[in-house]
Amino acid sequence: MGHTIRDKQKLLNRVRRIRGQVDAIERALTEENDCIHVLQQITSCRGAMTGLLAVVLEDHIRTHLVDAEAHAGEHGDAKEQLIDVVHSYFK
C-alpha cells in the first residue's frame, strides 16, 4: 500500500483514535458499566473502523482501479482483491 504513504499520518491518527475507543470498551466492561454505555462505545468504534475502511478503500479504488491495467502486475488483479476485501468485510 505504497500509495497510503502520503496520508500515513492521518491514517495513523485514525488508528490511534480507534485504539482509544477499543480501550474505552474494555474499561466499560471491566467497570461493569450499563449495557447502553457499552453498546454506544462499540457502535462508535465500529463507525470509526468503517470510516477508516472507507478512506483506504476509496484511495485503493482511485489508485488501482481507475487505471487497473497499469497496476495489474503489482499485486495481482486489483479488482479481485477489492472483491475479496468487500466479501471479508461483510462476513
Image (cartoon, rainbow, N blue to C red):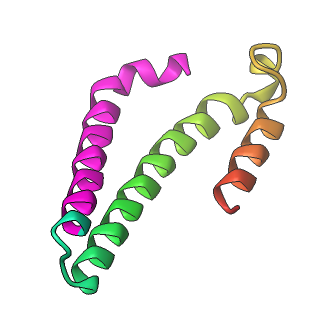
The residue at 21%/48% (across/down) is 20
On screen, residue 27 above or below 9: below
The residue closer to the viewer here, 3 or 47, is 47
On whether residue 12 falls in the magenta region, the answer is yes
The residue closer to the viewer here, 10 or 70, is 10
The residue closer to the viewer here, 36 or 78, is 36
The answer to which quarter of the image holds residue 61 is top right
Taken as a whole, is the magenta stretch helix, strand or loop?
Answer: helix
Question: Left or right: where does residue 90 sit relative to residue 22?
Answer: right
The residue closer to the viewer here, 88 or 23, is 23
Question: Left or right: where does residue 10 sit relative to residue 6?
Answer: left
Residue 60 horizontal/vertical position (percent): 60, 35
Magenta stretch in the rendered image: 1-28
On screen, residue 63 above or below 70: below
On whether residue 41 falls in the magenta region, the answer is no
Question: Left or right: where does residue 19 sit relative to residue 83?
Answer: left
